[in-house]
Amino acid sequence: MNKGFINFLIGLLILTGVLCLTHYYVFHMFFVDIDLFLPIWSIYVFNFILVISIFGFLRYKVNHGAKNGYILFSFLTLLKMVLALVFLSPLFFDKSNHTITEVFNFFIPYFIYLIYEIYSLDKFFKNQ
């Protein structure tokens, strides 16, 4: 592993820790009466695994000569959106009494992770 990937991983771990702790705090302070079908920790594990996988795969491909990094990123982001819908599919089949809250619980961290991923990949592509 090179220094750029380690820096990305450290930043992702810090982002995950801060977001997850903040999410737990806000949820337990203001939404105590809501029982979630999808636990908060599972949202962060899902997003963490997808972001680290996509970033690692793109770095590998670009470092081994792939010229279409942005196109590959677009395709992988589309795949990530499909996986997000699969992850949320129990909510769409009435498994939760608070579907809107659950969707917000998922998509706010999802977009924050996406912003971090885009920022990190942009920095990586500029250095290539």
Image (cartoon, grey):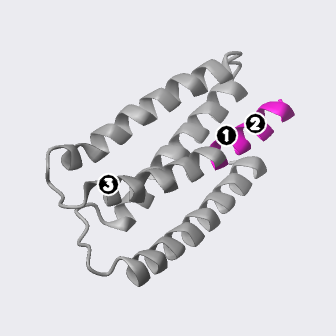
**Residue 34, position as x, y percentages in the image:** 26, 73
- State the separation of the CA atoms marked 3 and 2: 32 Å
Residue at 23%, 72% (x, y): give it: 35
Secondary element at image label 1: helix
Image: magenta residue range: 116-128
- State the separation of the CA atoms marked 1 and 3: 26 Å
**Rendered-image quadrant of the C terminus:** top right
The mark that comes first in sequence, 1 or 3, is 3
**Residue 108, position as x, y percentages in the image:** 50, 54
**Residue 110, position as x, y percentages in the image:** 49, 50
Give the answer, above or below, for where 104 lies relative to 67: below
Three-letter amino acid code at the position of disc 2: Asp
| Nearer the camera: disc 3 or disc 2 | 3
Three-letter amino acid code at the position of disc 1: Ile
Residue at 73%, 56% (x, y): give it: 7
Secondary element at image label 3: helix
Residue at 24%, 61% (x, y): give it: 98
Q: Is residue 103 magenta?
A: no
- State the separation of the CA atoms marked 1 and 2: 6 Å
**Residue closest to the eye, 70 or 102:** 102
**Residue closest to the eye, 66 or 39:** 39
Left/right placement of residue 50 relative to residue 113 reads left
**Residue closest to the eye, 4 or 43:** 43
Q: Quadrant of residue 121?
A: top right
- Name the residue carrying label 3: 100
**Residue closest to the eye, 12 or 65:** 12
Secondary element at image label 2: helix
- Name the residue carrying label 1: 118
Left/right placement of residue 76 relative to residue 38 reads right
Q: Mark 1–mark 2 contact, CB under 8 Å?
A: yes
- Name the residue carrying label 2: 122
